[in-house]
Amino acid sequence: MGSFSVWHWLIVLAVVLIFFGRGKIPELMGDVAKGIKNFKKGMAEEDTADKSSTVEHKADEVK
């Protein structure tokens, strides 16, 4: 009862294709990929900003 058979997965796939259509799924995956890429870019920019502020803060302490 806990596992799904091949027939269950085929039915789920058919329902997803009916709801979203063939062209909509690649667009959705592309949007997800762009979101992940932008998230990683934002995290990298945040790390760079944190490092530069730490360097500036240490330079102020030395003076």
Image (spheres, rainbow, N blue to C red):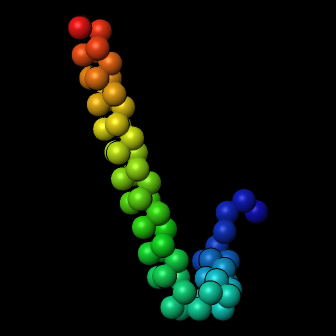
| Residue 38 in picture, x, y percent from top left | 41, 59
Q: In which quadrant will I find the C terminus?
A: top left
Visible residue check, residue 7: no
Q: Nearer the viewer, residue 24 or 1?
A: 24
Dividing the picture into quarters, in which one does residue 55 lie? top left
Q: In which quadrant will I find the N terminus?
A: bottom right
Visible residue check, residue 13: yes
Dividing the picture into quarters, in which one does residue 48 lie? top left
48 versus 22 height, above or below: above
| Residue 19 in picture, x, y percent from top left | 68, 88
Residue for point 40% across, 50% down: 42
| Direction right: furthest residue | 1
Q: Nearer the viewer, residue 37 or 5?
A: 37
36 versus 6 height, above or below: above
| Direction top: furthest residue | 62
Residue for point 62% across, 77% down: 9
Give the side of residue 61 with respect to residue 26, left or right: left
58 versus 6 height, above or below: above
| Residue 2 in picture, x, y percent from top left | 72, 59
Residue for point 67% across, 63% down: 3
Q: Nearer the viewer, residue 40 or 11?
A: 40
Give the side of residue 46 with respect to residue 15, left or right: left
- Number of marks drawn: 0
| Direction front: furthest residue | 63
49 versus 33 height, above or below: above
Q: Nearer the viewer, residue 2 or 22?
A: 22
Dividing the picture into quarters, in which one does residue 6 lie? bottom right
